[in-house]
Image (spheres, coloured by chain):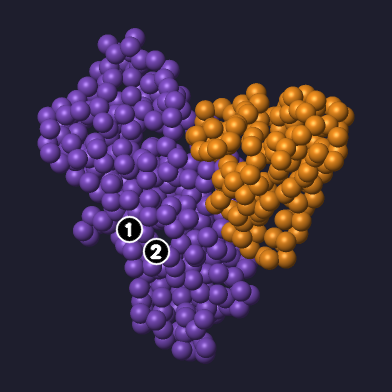
Chain colours: A purple, B orange
């Protein structure tokens, strides 16, 4: 590829000034060296690097993710994300539990391939650089996170529960079905969080992103995903999380129920997070609360698959469809 | 045909307790044949993408499992079970497959009369995330006796 041609492409497809010296990377192994203004060439495709993505957990900008580049596809000028191969292993905290987690580009590539065309998941494909590294080319989604959606709602819980939650619940069911389908393929998402579920600005579709976490254990492979699904359901049903600290605060309206709260009403993984929403919001349907209680410290039986979780949740969901007032 | 016992072994203290219990219970029974069975979880290609590295890791795990089985067999012999009544077996289970299914498949294949596992003493959180092998065996075992050793 001639530099003059690359300059023309940058000029015609980006609003950025063409750098004096253009660096074109065909090997992405040293991804830290790939800077804004550089280009990445893989399998005949050329991408202009705008910068890095940031950790961005729960509305806060965190550390730059040097292996995730924001790029412009110089073929058509569209914005994309390139995820470069980065292998790491670390301990992840699930509340008070700590488990070893591995980042696997190959897993994400495979899931992208297996969910191609299924818009419940982020879309993309994998190209290979000259060193054989998988480079995932991800379509950018104009969206907000589920976390941001819930936090942007300014209303009391009861209004939210009757007027907004049924619509959210319906979308969440579709998103939960997507995870069930993923599990049926023998895959796990690996990092189900409120900010890994995006809601498209245009059309409001719910879409899962980021599938590169994996784990190694001999037992139940879906436990981590179920943990994530339970958290999202609690977050949605409660319009945020309700901790013991919040309930005790001077501004809390729930002082009268404090003496009625037991250890078993709280989350198995986050002992300060109330799971038994019915104790503070008595209008929450029993069928929904029962599902939440499978994630509580007092639970005797846990879900082992998304299928079981959804089966129970469907009962609660149907009661919303029928509009049974305070239905069970 | 004598009584065939399948003992699930992993690298934990509860497996040792299960072996001790089996030894103490079956030592006087001449017709009991004991198979110590280790279900080995193969290294995942997602974590070990390089085939040679995966092979090396599998070999390492295989040797570790074998050492563990030999130590357990020696323990049984020490308790007084004749070595000719002890068999050792390792099975590699694919990632995604679980240990309890592998144990129960082996039970059916081998026509074992009794399956023995140790109870791990997991916390509830661990049970949520990883599942309990002994609970699954109790729930899903058919046409055999299950001993869960605490």
Q: Position of residue A223 (x, y in %)?
A: 48, 41
Label 1 crowding class (10 Å Cα cut-off): few <14, some 14-19, many 20+? many
Q: Position of residue B136 (x, y in %)?
A: 53, 36
Query: Of the numbered discs in the image, which one, if any, rests on residue A115?
Result: 2
Q: Which residue is label 1 attached to? A: A120
Closer to the camera, A186 or A188?
Answer: A186
Q: What is the residue that sits farthest to the front in this orientation? A: B1
Looking at the picture, does residue B140 appear above or below residue A245? Answer: below
Say which quarter of the image contains residue B33: top right
Please tell me which residue lies in front, B95 or A35: B95
Q: How many marks?
A: 2
Q: Position of residue A310 (x, y in %)?
A: 32, 43
Given residues A272 and B55, the one toward you in this image is: B55
- Circles 2 and 1 on the same subunit: yes
Label pair 2/1, CB-CB below 8 angstroms: yes
Q: Chain of mark 2?
A: A
At a point 65% along the width and 23% down the height, the residue shown is B150
The residue sitting at 85% across, 41% down in the picture is B84
């Amino acid at each position: 590829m001639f530099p003059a041609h690359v300059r023309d492409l940058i000029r015609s497809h980006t609003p950025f000034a063409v750098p004096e010296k253009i660096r074109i990377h065909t090997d992405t192994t040293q991804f830290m060296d790939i800077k804004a203004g550089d280009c990445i060439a893989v399998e005949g495709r050329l991408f202009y690097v705008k910068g890095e993505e940031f950790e961005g957990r729960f509305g806060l900008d965190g550390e730059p993710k040097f292996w995730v580049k924001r790029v412009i596809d110089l073929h058509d000028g569209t914005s994309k994300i390139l995820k470069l191969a980065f292998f790491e292993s670390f301990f992840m905290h699930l509340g008070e539990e700590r488990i070893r987690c591995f980042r696997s580009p190959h897993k994400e590539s495979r899931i992208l391939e297996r969910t191609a065309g299924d818009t419940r998941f982020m879309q993309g494909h994998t190209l290979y650089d000259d060193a054989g590294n998988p480079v995932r080319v991800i379509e950018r989604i104009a969206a907000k996170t589920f976390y941001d959606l819930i936090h942007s709602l300014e209303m009391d819980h009861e209004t939210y529960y009757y007027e907004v939650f049924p619509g959210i619940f319906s979308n969440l069911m579709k998103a939960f079905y997507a995870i069930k389908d993923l599990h049926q393929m023998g895959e796990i998402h690996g990092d189900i969080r409120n900010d890994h579920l995006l809601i498209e600005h245009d059309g409001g579709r719910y879409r899962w992103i980021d599938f590169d976490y994996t784990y190694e254990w001999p037992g139940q492979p879906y436990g981590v995903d179920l943990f994530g699904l339970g958290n999202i359901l609690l977050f949605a049903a409660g319009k945020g999380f309700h901790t013991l600290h919040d309930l005790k605060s001077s501004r809390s309206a729930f002082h009268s129920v404090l003496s009625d709260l037991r250890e078993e009403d709280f989350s198995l993984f986050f002992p300060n997070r109330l799971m038994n929403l019915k104790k503070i919001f008595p209008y929450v349907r029993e069928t929904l609360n029962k599902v939440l209680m499978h994630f509580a410290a007092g639970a005797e039986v846990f879900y082992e698959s998304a299928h079981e979780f959804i089966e129970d949740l469907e009962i609660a969901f149907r009661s919303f469809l029928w509009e049974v007032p305070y239905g069970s | 045909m004598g009584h065939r016992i399948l003992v699930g072994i992993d690298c934990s203290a509860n497996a040792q307790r299960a072996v001790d219990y089996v030894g103490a219970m079956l030592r006087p029974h001449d017709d009991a044949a004991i198979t110590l069975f280790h279900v080995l979880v193969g290294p995942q290609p997602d974590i070990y993408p390089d085939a040679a590295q995966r092979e090396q890791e599998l070999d390492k795990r295989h040797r570790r499992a074998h050492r563990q089985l030999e130590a357990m067999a020696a323990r049984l012999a020490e308790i007084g079970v004749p070595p000719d009544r002890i068999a050792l077996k390792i099975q590699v289970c694919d990632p995604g497959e679980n240990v309890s299914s592998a144990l129960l498949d082996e039970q059916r294949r081998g026509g074992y009369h009794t399956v023995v596992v140790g109870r791990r003493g997991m916390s509830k959180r661990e049970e949520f995330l990883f599942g309990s092998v002994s609970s699954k065996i109790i729930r899903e075992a058919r046409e055999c006796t299950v001993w869960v050793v605490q």
